[in-house]
Amino acid sequence: MQPSWRQAPVKGDLPLPMANAKDKDDTGCIKKGGPSGLVTVLVGLKWWVSLQENDAMWEAAVNDLNGCFEYWSKPVVGKKRRGGELVNDVAKKQKG
């Protein structure tokens, strides 16, 4: 499910953080909604935390998911991210 630029160097580790993403990197393959998308990730994190306390890997996963949301909400003026719209087009739609 993860694109190649997010693959963990060691099997079983979490994916590399979204902070590693460059404008040319495709994030559309992980920006998914619906029953098999990000909602499932949130439910999984809730389930995971109820099983253990103070799990550093869980905290890293939450921080990474937060980084994903921040990355996708950050405007990139005049450029098109793969899997997204031109920021100028989004601004026009919001103005009416």
Image: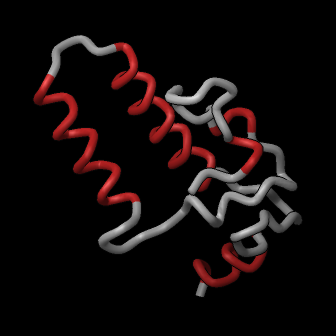
Q: Position of residue 33 (x, y in %)?
A: 42, 70
Residue 7 against residue 29 in the figure, above or below: above
Q: How is the image coloured?
A: secondary structure
Residue 56 located left or right of residue 48:
right
Of 4 and 84, the residue lying toward us: 4
Q: Position of residue 75 (x, y in %)?
A: 70, 56
Q: Residue at x 19, y 28 (%)?
A: 49
- State the residue lying farthest toward the front: 11
Which of the 4 image quadrants contains residue 37?
Answer: bottom left
Marks counted in the figure total: 0
Q: Residue at x 39, y 32 (%)?
A: 62
Q: Quadrant of the image for the N terminus?
A: bottom right
Q: Residue at x 39, y 58 (%)?
A: 38
Residue 1 located left or right of residue 59:
right
Q: Position of residue 28 (x, y in %)?
A: 65, 66
Q: Residue at x 88, y 65 (%)?
A: 78
Residue 93 against residue 74 in the figure, above or below: below
Which of the 4 image quadrants contains residue 30?
Answer: bottom right
Q: Position of residue 85 (x, y in %)?
A: 72, 75
Q: Quadrant of the image for the C terminus?
A: bottom right
Which of the 4 image quadrants contains residue 20?
Answer: top right
Of 79 and 42, the residue lying toward us: 42
- State the residue lying farthest toward the bottom: 96
